[in-house]
Structure formats: C-alpha cells, structure tokens
C-alpha cells in the first residue's frame, strides 16, 4: 500500500474529509518552501500538492500565476522541484505528496526519465492539468510501473461518456474542479457541488477531491459534506505571499481544524 493509499484508507475509516494543500515549489524561495513543506503535516495537511512552476499556467488564476512567477524568478526548475521533494522526504517520510502541473516541462525532461526521477525523489502521484486522456498512455504506463498514481481531473462540464473514459484507469483519487474557470474564483452553490459529485461517484469508487474555490474554513466544511478531500490552493498562496511561512501554516491549521470538527460531528 502506498503512502497515498494508506492516508486515504485512514481518512475513510475515521469518517472525515482530508485536507489537501497546494503550494508552488520554490515559492517564495527554495529555503522557505522547504520549511513550509516540512511544517504542513503538523499543521494538519493530509496530502500535499506541490506545483511544478510553469511559465504559462493557463488553468491558474492571478494568485497562483504570481506564485509561479515568483518561483521561476527565483530559479525554480523541474530538477530543483524534484530535489526539493528529496529534501522534504529526509524530514517527512509519511505524508503523501502529489506533483501538479503542466505537460511541457515533463516532455522536455523526457517522460521515462521524469517518472523514474519523481519516484526516486519520493513523489506519490501526478496531476497533469493539460494532459488529455487520449494522449496519456505513455505517461500512465510509466507511472504505474513506478508505483505512481496518475490522478484524473473532472469538471462540471464533463459528460457521462467522457467521465467513463477519464476514469477507466484512474487511481489514487479523482480531482473534481468545482467550477468552469480558473483557480481562486467563487465557490459554486452547494446544491451544484452535491449534484456534480453524486454524478461523479456513479462512475468511480475512488475518493473524490474537490477544489478550485475554497477560501475559508466555513467553505471547507461545506465542501467536506460532499467530498472525501478538500483542496485549498489560491487562498494559501495568498496568505504565504502576505504573511510568510508562519502565516500560511496558521491558515492550514484553521482549515484542518474545521475539517476535523466536521469529522467529529459526523
């Protein structure tokens, strides 16, 4: 059982939703980012999403675009991101870490080499935002061979036939984008969230993560009524930019406490 599988199983047994925290690798600088990553588990994060900075992050809103800009300006590269994961694993061998980003840097690195290097660094899964399922065979096969989860993404606009093909070989969890827009926008109506996630669950037994729009503990609790994992990214990147590592970890503590209260109530 992988780190991610173990965490998801433990969350299911506990009856609560897990917190997934997103930060861009190298933001605000490499040293501070490592300090941040090493503090996330104690702050209450269940799964870490680590963004691979890219010059054209088309799915990201202004806050995460600026996080990418800061990281790239500080010299962050894909190789340095993998090195960051290796350094993190020296401090934390247990918290699942998923790399999230775009396909172009992976292609430049070479798919087989990237998968091998990611697995060796201690990565547990991959979310490739702009990788169509029709072109995912090579990367998916390489990932499975190295024990990495290739995590699929769904959206409110995903039709049933599309969901069936998306989820046919999915593993780990499914990342549901709750809105048809970029990161950090509004949170949809709860009825819409419930309807979309119920439809998604008719196609898969995998845990469902919901993200794009969660900005507060109250919103996290709302989403947790329907999702197995709640993803928070833009809000955390904003706090990190404004208040530094200590502020970002405090924000994570508040979100984690809200989800644990939800679990206690359940």
Image (cartoon, rainbow, N blue to C red):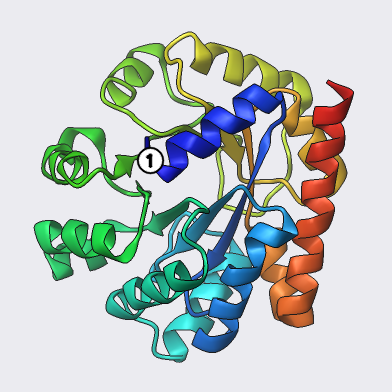
Give the residue displayed 87% in from the left and 41% down from the top.
218
Residue indicated by mark 1:
2
Return the x and y of residue 38 as percentages of the image width and height.
59, 70
**Is residue 55 among the parts visible in the rendering?**
no
Q: Which SS class for mark 1?
A: loop
Return the x and y of residue 137 as percentages of the image width and height.
13, 37
Q: Camera-side residue: 5 or 60?
A: 5
- Relative height, residue 214 to residue 91 (above, below): above
Give the quarter of the figure containing the C terminus.
Answer: top right
Q: Residues within 10 Å of mark 1 (few under 14, many from 20)?
A: some
Q: Camera-side residue: 87 or 223?
A: 87
- Relative height, residue 193 to residue 137 (above, below): above
Horizontal arrangement in the rendering, residue 14 relative to residue 3 (left or right): right
Q: Quadrant of residue 259?
A: top right
Horizontal arrangement in the rendering, residue 153 relative to residue 233 (left or right): left
**Is residue 246 among the parts visible in the rendering?**
yes
Return the x and y of residue 42 as percentages of the image width and height.
70, 60
């Amino acid at each position: 059982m992988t780190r991610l599988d173990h965490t998801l199983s433990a969350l299911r047994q506990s009856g609560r939703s897990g917190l997934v925290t997103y930060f861009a690798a190298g933001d605000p600088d490499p040293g501070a980012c490592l300090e941040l990553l090493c503090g996330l588990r104690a702050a209450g994060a269940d799964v870490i999403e680590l963004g691979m900075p890219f010059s054209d992050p088309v799915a990201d809103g202004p806050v995460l675009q600026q996080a990418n800009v800061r990281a790239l300006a500080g010299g962050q590269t894909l190789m340095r991101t993998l090195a960051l994961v290796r350094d993190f694993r020296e401090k934390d061998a247990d918290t699942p870490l998923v790399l999230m980003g775009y396909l172009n840097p992976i292609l430049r690195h070479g798919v087989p080499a990237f998968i091998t290097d990611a697995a060796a660094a201690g990565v547990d899964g991959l979310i490739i935002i702009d990788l169509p399922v029709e072109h995912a065979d090579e990367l998916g096969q390489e990932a499975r061979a190295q024990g990495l989860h290739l995590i699929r993404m769904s959206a409110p606009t995903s039709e049933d036939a599309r969901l069936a093909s998306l989820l046919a070989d999915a593993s780990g969890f499914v990342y549901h984008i709750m809105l048809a827009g970029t990161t950090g926008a509004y949170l949809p109506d709860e009825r819409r969230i419930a309807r979309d996630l119920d439809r998604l669950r008719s196609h898969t037994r995998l845990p469902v993560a919901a993200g794009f729009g969660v900005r507060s503990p109250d919103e996290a609790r709302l989403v947790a009524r329907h999702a197995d994992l709640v993803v928070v990214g833009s809000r955390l990147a904003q706090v990190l930019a404004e208040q530094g590592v200590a502020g970002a970890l405090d924000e994570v503590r508040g979100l984690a406490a809200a989800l644990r209260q939800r679990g206690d109530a359940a």
